[in-house]
Image (cartoon, rainbow, N blue to C red):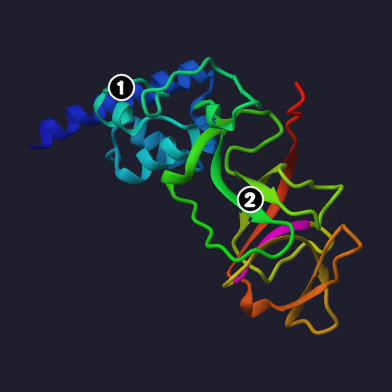
Amino acid sequence: MENKLQSSNEDIISRIRYLMNEMHLNQGQFARRVEMDATNMSKHLNGKLPINDTLINKIAVNLGVSREWLRYGKDLPFAKDGAHFEPGLINVANRDLVPTYVGTPVYDIDVAAGCSPRAMMFSDDNIVGNINLPAVAPNCRIVQVSGDSMTPIINSGDMVAIREIESTEIIFWGQIYVVILDDYRLVKYLRKHDDPSMVILRSENPNYDDIEVPRSKIRQLFLVQNVIRIDSRL
């Protein structure tokens, strides 16, 4: 059993090295792209640590790689539902044709630049493609914005690359965040409140009033890193 497991590890390691070669990444760069400690990545690739589901999932989610290919060598490295796209293709006339390509994952969910009660789910089933842009970090997630409260900074239909903040205790005041509450997910500026237990959610559009929210009610916080605007006239 141990020899069989080791053989399986070696096959997966070979496919990981193939990805590194295709993406022109060294070991440290690859580790950063999949959000993993470089030392542990080295141990995995040298056979000192077994290839586990955590590593496979990190590679699949962050790079858009097929799990079937990575685990068993089946299918194509970047295949998704049997579809094939040329690298870098973005068809703005049909949003269903978002390419499966290495880069930052795009989720089929939206956040409201207003107030719209919905649950936020960053599950693999919601990934519809990947965007590979030098300015967008691979550890971000890309979601679409609906509503006009942040116009003209962020328009309805724009996409934003967001990075999760581990603690709501440290907030960069005046920056734009996606704020997840029990019943709402909102895109707003975060401003300091006179009461340190509260925060102010402020819109860019002056037609929207400020919203005062207790810090304790914030379930998740994501810093908006980039705004991605696709010109559908092309």
Residue designated by label 1: 75
Element type at marker 1?
Answer: loop
Picture coordinates of residue 35 (x, y %)?
Answer: 51, 43
Question: Is residue 89 rendered magenta in the image?
Answer: no
Picture quadrant where residue 60 is located: top left
Quadrant where the C terminus is found in the figure = top right
- The amino acid on which the numbered mark 2 sits, given as a three-letter code, is Arg
Instruction: Answer left or right for 119 relative to 193.
Output: left
Label located before the other in sequence (1 or 2): 1
Question: Is residue 180 rendered magenta in the image?
Answer: yes
Picture coordinates of residue 116 (x, y %)?
Answer: 65, 63
How busy is the neighbourhood of tag 2: few (under 14 within 10 Å), some, or many (20 plus)?
A: many
Question: How far apart in space, not on screen, are marks 1 and 2 (Cα)?
Answer: 31 Å
- Residue 11 visible? The answer is yes
Q: How many marks?
A: 2
How busy is the neighbourhood of tag 1: few (under 14 within 10 Å), some, or many (20 plus)?
A: some
- Residue 36 visible? The answer is no
Picture coordinates of residue 196 (x, y %)?
Answer: 77, 81
In this view, 117 is above or below 216: above
Quadrant where the N terminus is found in the figure = top left
Q: Main secondary structure of the magenta part?
A: strand
Residue designated by label 2: 163
Residue stretch rendered in magenta on the structure: 176-181
Instruction: Answer left or right for 219 relative to 64.
Output: right
Name the residue at 20% across, 29% down. 8
Name the residue at 53% across, 31% down. 96
